[in-house]
Amino acid sequence: MDILHVASDFPYPPHHGGRVDIWGRVRALADLGHRIHLVATVRNRPSPDELSVVQGRVAQLDLIERRSNLAGLLSSLPLQVSTRRGLRSVPLWPHYDLALLEQEFTGSILENPQLHTSRVILRVHNDEPEFLTDLRKASPSAWKQAYYALEARRFQSWSPSVFSKADELWFISSDHHRKWAQAHPGEAGRATWLPPPIARTMLPPRPVPGANVLFVGNLVAPTNIQGLEWYLSEVQPALRQIPGYRFTIAGSLLGNSLPSSLRRAQERGDCTLLLNARDLTAVYRDSSVFVNPMQRGASLKLKTVNAAEQGLPIVTTSVGNEGTGFQHDVHLLVADQPAGFASCVRRLLTVPQDRISLTNSSQNFLRARYDQGQQLCQLLAPGALGAS
């Protein structure tokens, strides 16, 4: 097939959730033998080495600079859409078998007069209005709260318009897919759950000695910070008496300053911070339990999936488990109250066989349901969803 793949971000290096998902799909489509025209919207130009890696997987690569201006701020369109208005005029091939859009951010490509395609597929990463509303509620900044509120209102109109133009919807989150299908029973047939790609190899579970608890995630998103603050203040006091207990927070600041709450926690000795590390192999290997204490945030939490790939048992809130397909006490442990969360962490730190069994179960589920190449092969086969 000739595929137009429109990416909301440059997919390499895959150092955060959105890029991991997009890059895994690029690789899987290329491995299946499809010819890809990748159009990626970027804020900064990638390095020559990064460009070379991606060009080795696609037939053609075009970069569209994301541009902000006053008109975009005053527009009725979401800012994430108006900054990508260059998609309306990017030169395209005469015809594509399908156009794959990553997020509603890239919906402007459908207004490009050169676009001729047999199928339009939208990859749904988030329930954007809900996601932005959660960011607003978790943010301590008044101006960011105003921005998130405005973007949420804009996406309430924009997202349905892009959904209506797509022949198929590939949801990253199992929960978002289920909710959307229930709300649109007459259209459920064009929607499916396509999990994100997993690593080619997964680390086996191992009985790591000690009581090392780990969180990995960017330290910019207010939903991550809110969850960490909840864990540090409400959960961790009940765990300090465990011999050798240690909590490590590993994450990127993406050029921003360290949040004050985490700086204070580090100074008190409540946690160890590992900032902007390029390779987390050692910290995963030396940890006993992974925690995802998020209180807000829509769509799938890739950090939970990544922890299972890395061979760690997981304790998470319901929010942190959203969209993964994992089940409580089968693949991981879920608790939403501080006492229950602490009890689950204590159980996994003190009962090694539970760590092994839960991790084996979660990894078996990933192998069965998250194989991107197998899933795409089925979705793109004649007769699948909107395929002809």
Image (cartoon, rainbow, N blue to C red):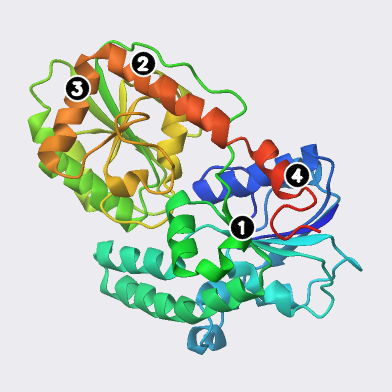
Q: Give the quarter of the image for residue 33.
A: top right
Q: Dots 3 and 1: beta carbons under 8 Å?
A: no
- The residue carrying mark 3 is 347
Mark sitting earlier along the chain (2/4)? 4
Dot 3 alpha-carbon crowd within 10 angstroms: few under 14, some 14 to 19, many 20 or more:
some
Instruction: Give the CA distance from mark 1 to mark 2.
Output: 36 Å
- The residue carrying mark 4 is 29
Mark sitting earlier along the chain (3/2)? 3
- Quadrant location, the C terminus: bottom right
Instruction: Give the CA distance from mark 4 to mark 3.
Output: 42 Å
- The residue carrying mark 1 is 9
Q: Amino acid at mark 4?
A: Leu
Q: Amino acid at mark 3?
A: Arg
Q: Secondary structure at mark 3?
A: helix
Residue nearer the viewer, 60 or 331: 331
The location of residue 314, given as percent across then percent down, is 33, 30
- The residue carrying mark 2 is 356
The location of residue 141, given as percent across then percent down, is 27, 68
Q: Amino acid at mark 1?
A: Asp
Q: Dots 4 and 1: beta carbons under 8 Å?
A: no
Instruction: Give the CA distance from mark 3 to mark 1.
Output: 40 Å
Q: Is residue 342 above or below residue 156?
A: above
Q: Give the quarter of the image for residue 205.
A: top left
Mark sitting earlier along the chain (3/1)? 1
Dot 4 alpha-carbon crowd within 10 angstroms: few under 14, some 14 to 19, many 20 or more:
many
Q: Is residue 118 above or below residue 290?
A: below
Mark sitting earlier along the chain (4/1)? 1
Q: Amino acid at mark 2?
A: Ile
